[in-house]
Each structure stands twice: as structure tokens, then as C-alpha cells.
Image (cartoon, helix red, strand yellow):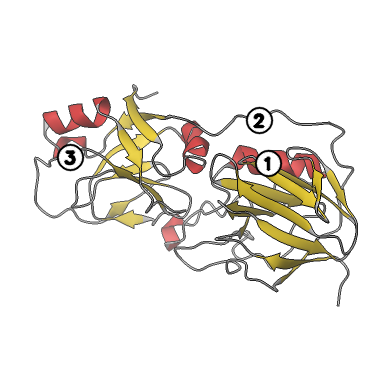
Amino acid sequence: MTDHALSVVRAGALTTVQDLGRPGHAHLGVPRSGALDPPAAALANRLAGNPADAAVLETTLNGCTVRPRSTVTMAATGAPCRVTVNGRPAAWGAPVRVPAGALLDVGPAVSGVRTYLAVSGGVAVEPVLGSRSTDLLSGLGPPPLTDGAVLPLGRPAGLHARVDVAPQPGPPTELVLRVTLGPRDDWFSPEAVRVFTSRPYRVSPASNRIGLRTEGPVLDRAVTRELPSEGMVLGAIQVPPDGRPVVFLADHPTTGGYPVIAVVRASDLPAAAQAPPGTPIRFIPVRRR
């Protein structure tokens, strides 16, 4: 059994392996998947001395606990949390040396939702369609972590970053999403479009990696006939029969039969990954670029 591995002691509520995802396969019905907060995942990899495409662990709300079988460098970014090595405090947002057999605990998020844990060498599970990402919708990639799982690690590619703590944006207290209206905004009444772009919503507890669901005003449709399934893109805001917008995230379906009222700018989506239930949301219309 290889010494370059990571034993999972506590998997947490939902911890998955994620990298840059598998874009370019939508025509096959395969979502892109990948880290919901790409800047946080990329920073963790830089701190640990990994290339940008190395696979990391994405935790949800209550972190995870792991034990490396060889001495490694680890880095936790994204949602701020308490980090310990064998019960002793360690740095969050900085490289941490973890000896072989030591217990590294990534605690519950103090704010935000998802913490990213990079390990020197990267998580080296078998890639599927060029990616090691777990896709909760299609089931591609490794399954979500369970207690007792063992993850292979790659060989370190370089030295870890020489920093004390890396600055990174905090989780949003209000989620402001810039949107381009369309392609089906004309399926909604003018009043519904006005409500969508002027009234506040909140992040629903039913949100997940597939979509950020919202609570708030119901959007009335002007066109009530059935819509043939259409291609869906990252950030598309689909409005299901209950009238409340759903923002599609990394594991979104590649097609859908409900009208898309708008599309969120990609640069605003990492903040959506860190918005806990109850976070206020505002949709701000912008012109097409």
C-alpha cells in the first residue's frame, strides 16, 4: 500500500474531490462540475505548491479530518475555519506542514460555506473525462468522501508558497449578482422582470452544488405553454413552476425545460458558493458585453 495517501477520519457533511472540472462535454450531457469557488481552490493549490489543475477537497459547512501517511504540506482556503494538527492550532490560508500520521482537522466554517483543502501532490484519484471532480448530478468522478476512505496522492511538483497568510475575500453578507437578461425574459410579465431586478431574495437551505435556490417573490409568467428543453450554461437562472429563481452552479444539468430569465456573470459565481442560507440576494441587470 502506498505511503502517498490520505486517510479520511471524518468526512463531514459533504466533502468531495474537485479540480477545474470537465468543460467541453455538454454535447454529451456531461456537466462541467469542478470547484464551486475556483479562486479559493486555486489559492489553496498555490499555497501547497501544486499546479492549478491539481485536485483538492471541497468541504461543506462542517469541514473534515484527515491523516496523511507521509509528511505533506496542506493549505485551507475559502470559508474561514479553525485548523488544527494533532489538536494544536495551525494557520488557515497559509501552508501548513503536517507530519506523517498526524491528524489534521478542518473545523466548521466560521462564515461562508465551503473550505478548500489542498495537499502537496494533489489528490490523485483516477480521472474521468480528463477530470478528478465529483459530479453530484451525473455521478461521474469519485463518490463523496466517507469515513475510512483512502485517497491516493500525487508526487509534489514544487515548493510550497513562502507566505505567512494569503489575503482572500471574505464570504458575502449580501450576494450581489450581475445578470444579463434573457434568453427567455420575454416569457415573464414586465412586472415580474421588474420584481426580479429590484426586490431582494434570500439563499434557500435547499441550495446545493447543482443550483443556488432562492426564497422571495414569485415571478409570474406571461407565456404559460411548455418550453422544449434547451441548453443550459453555468450561471443560468431558471424559473421552475414555483416561480422562484434557481441559479445554476457547477453540477447543473446541460439541458432544461423551464425558462431562463437571465444569466449571472461568471465572475460573481464564486461568491454564490460561499453564501449560506438566509443570505440576502440582489439581481442587478447589466448590458450585454
Up/down of 16 relative to 164, above or below = below
Is tag 3's residue or tag 2's residue first in the polypeptide sequence? 2
The quarter of the displayed image where residue 189 is located: top left
Mark 3 vs mark 1: give the one in front: 1
Q: Amino acid at mark 1?
A: Thr
Identify the amino acid type marked 2: Gln
Element assignment for label 3? loop
Q: Which residue is mark 2?
A: 168
In the drawing, what numbered circle is on residue 219? Answer: 3
Indicate which disc residue 77 carries: 1
| Image quadrant containing the N terminus | bottom right
The amino acid marked with disc number 3 is: Leu
Q: Is residue 82 above or below residue 164?
A: below
Nearest the eye: 286 or 279: 279
Q: Work out whether mark 3 precedes mark 1 in sequence or the reverse, and give the earlier one.
A: 1
Q: Residue at x 72, y 43 (%)?
A: 44
**Looking at the image, do the residues carrying marks 3 and 1 touch, with CB atoms under 8 Å apart?**
no
